[in-house]
Image (tube, grey):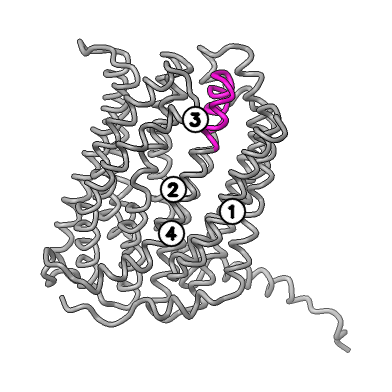
Amino acid sequence: MKNPHTNPESPSRAAARLRSSLLDGPGGLRRMLPIAVPMIVSQLFDTTMMFVDRLFLSHVSPLAMASCMTGGITAFLCGQLFFGVVAYCATLVAHRFGAQRHQECPVIVIQAAWMACAAYPIILLIGRVTVNAFTWVGHTPAQIELETAYFSILINASILGLLRAAFSGFFAGIGQTRVIMFGNALALLIHVGANYILIFGKLGAPALGIVGAAYGTVLASGVMTLFLAVAFFRRTLQRPYRGARLLRFVPEVCAKLVRYGVPNGIEGFIGIFCFTAIVLLIHAMGEDVAAAITMVFNWDLVSFFPILGVQIAVSTLVGQNLGAGHVAGARQAAWTGLALTLAYTGALAILFLSVPQTLLRPFASAASPEIVRLAVPMLRLAALYLMFDGTALIFSGALRGAGDTFWAMLIGIGFHVLLITVCVVAIYLFRAGPITVWAAVCFAIFSGGIAYYLRFRQGRWQQLGLALAGKNVEC
């Protein structure tokens, strides 16, 4: 007689269900990896460009390396609100692609490009005021001079980043992210070569230091923007995308970009603003502390930017599935992205905890023993928040892919205000040292992953996502 309490087939059925939930289906790894892997590689290329900037500048001086970080982040901050609006075209493209409305996809991208051009003068005006932030937070005159030089060059070239976001949004939305990867690979080659020549004065060029790093970055950004623009217009001449009148203004599309993109931009703006403020506050604790935390953030970027590649894949698949009316596939995409992220951040956390001296060594050639002494425990503390930070990125990407940008914005604002409050209180109220301040910030990051997960679990994003595709846009 068969024992009802035993079921020898249960393990195999459980394995099959696990395999199905991760590998198969419209949100499984088989669909996600072709989108995610090129974006992960692209983000690694972006990370490598920043990594190389700071590595080269660390051989100039630790102060130049630190100034590159603060100047670059502050320049990016000035355009982040508009960047969020323009970049949201990727989600709208994904919904149209999932709904088989292919001719509308290029129309959305062109509207985003028009909005990028309109935003550029505003960004320049914002930059004229923001450049004073280095003085307001009390940086040394030597650091202010370097930060201002780097910032000014990048802010004047900000239109390139906006247009790049628009054109890359097309390929991200339709899932053809290899084009973005190829563009990033070309940009990386130009970036490394140009920065080496311009920073150190090779091949007869003058040694420009941090100014050379800025010019090399702008050159690489321009080449990638041109590459994506050419690829976009070539693709729009092919089926099933051709047929739309691309260059005309479409109010319905711009309205959706504003409605869903503004909260997306505000969330990104608040995040970058608070991160920048935290960096500036910690930098103001002294030049040794500034150099140490910059060394740590160099490795933090290794974790952050590849996860952005997975986040983009999650947003794309959530948008495509909801555009096709497939809620279960959208939900599966989020959990698949989370599994990838936790595996990656877990491995990095082990490295940060076990071999911090080895990881910091490339940046320590011109650093004093005091800088290294500060950087080692800071890098170990960074290992504590990696998986929570990754969780926040994945679930926020799923919410944005479904159009739940308002609540994602509210969570992002609350989370980042908490981070900067913890930092300010630790520095100015408790007069804590740099290690204690950084530890407080690391523990506060836990709240972000929890908050985004709870919103995702509520499930209200599902109805929003199904309504996002809207009516057809006349092409």
Q: CA distance from mark 3 to mark 1?
A: 22 Å
Residue 463 is covered by the magenta coloring: no
Q: Is residue 358 left or right of residue 305?
A: right
User: Which x, y percent locates residue 395?
Assistant: 54, 61
The residue that label 2 is drawn on is 40
User: In which quadrant is the C terminus drawn?
Assistant: bottom left
Residue 285 is covered by the magenta coloring: yes
Q: CA distance from mark 3 to mark 2?
A: 35 Å
Mark 3 vs mark 2, foreground winner is 3
Q: Residue at x 55, y 62 (%)?
A: 336
- For the residue carrying disc 3, how many other residues have a C-alpha within 10 Å: few (<14), some (14-19), or many (20+)? few
The residue that label 3 is drawn on is 137
User: In which quadrant is the N terminus drawn?
Assistant: bottom right
User: Which x, y percent locates residue 461?
Assistant: 50, 74
Residue type at tag 1: Phe
The residue that label 4 is drawn on is 313
Residue type at tag 2: Ile
Q: Of helix, strand and loop, which one carries label 1? A: helix
The dot on residue 415 is: 1
Answer yes or no: do the residues labelled 4 and 1 have beta carbons within 8 Å? no
Q: CA distance from mark 2 to mark 1?
A: 25 Å
Residue type at tag 4: Ala
Task: Name the magenta segment's main secondary structure.
Answer: helix
Quarter of the figure with residue 361:
top right
The magenta region covers 278-297
Mark 2 or mark 4, which has the lower sequence index? 2
User: Which x, y percent locates residue 369?
Assistant: 63, 12
